[in-house]
Amino acid sequence: QVQLVESGGGLVQAGGSLRLSCAASGRTSSIYTMGWFRQAPGQERDFVAGITQSGGSTVYADSVKGRFTISRDNAKNMLWLQMNSLKPEDTGLYYCAGTSSLRVAANLRIGKKARSDEYANWGQGTQVTVSS
């Protein structure tokens, strides 16, 4: 089993920044690809960013490209999402996710975004609220 715990959410004004963290524990060696998803009230859980195990490939949703940066440190079992130039539409519950799917990893290396049902391991989420 893998446990994922997010932190770093909060309330920020538009144009501000936040850094989300995700700590992984348990059978972390089983996770190859990790990602961030977000869900606004009444909306589906949407892909935000993904990163391969080596960190060599990253993919972003078009809406966050150029503003958000995903990174990881495998030695520390940590995943981060640096969010800059935040907008009110970035508001939502942000989830850290992991998968052992080689297909997801291969897709990410060619720039293909993932669906939430392709990830098996999830954190409890951290709330990000951006005020206008």
Image: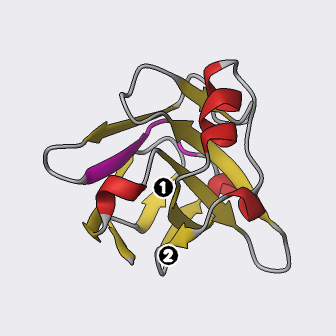
What's the magenta bit mostly, secondary-structure-wise?
Answer: strand
Q: Is 84 one of the magenta-colored residues?
A: yes
Identity of the residue drawn at 65% across and 28% down: 106
Closer to the camera, 9 or 24? 24
Given the image, on which type of amino acid does mark 1 rest?
A: Gln
- Which one is earlier in the sequence, the residue at label 1 or at label 2? 1
Indicate the secondary structure of the residue bearing disc 1.
Answer: strand
Q: Which residue is mark 2?
A: 125
Say which of 48 and 97 sits in front: 97
- Tag 1 and tag 2, C-beta contact below 8 Å: no
> Where in the figure is residue 111, as x and y percent of width and height?
70, 21
Name the image quarter holding the C terminus.
bottom right
Give percent across and percent down for residue 45.
75, 66
Q: Position of residue 101 (x, y in %)?
A: 61, 49
Q: Of helix, strand and loop, which one carries label 2?
A: loop
Q: Is residue 87 left or right of residue 30?
A: right
Q: Hey, which quadrant is residue 22 in on the image? A: bottom left
Q: Nearer the viewer, mark 1 or mark 2?
A: 2
Q: CA distance from mark 1 to mark 2?
A: 20 Å
Kind of residue at disc 2: Gly
Q: Which residue bears the numbered disc 1? A: 13
124 up-or-down from 29: above or below: below
Residue at 70%, 68% in the rendered image = 39
Residue 102 shows in the view: yes
Q: Where's the N terminus, which quadrant? A: bottom left
Left or right of 98, for residue 112? right
Of residues 132 and 123, the one nearer the viewer is 123
Stretch in magenta:
78-86
Residue 42, quarter of the rendered image: bottom right
Asked if residue 111 is among those painted magenta in the image, a careful observer would answer: no
Q: Kindly tell me whether residue 21 is visible in this rendering.
A: no
Q: Which mark is residue 3?
A: none
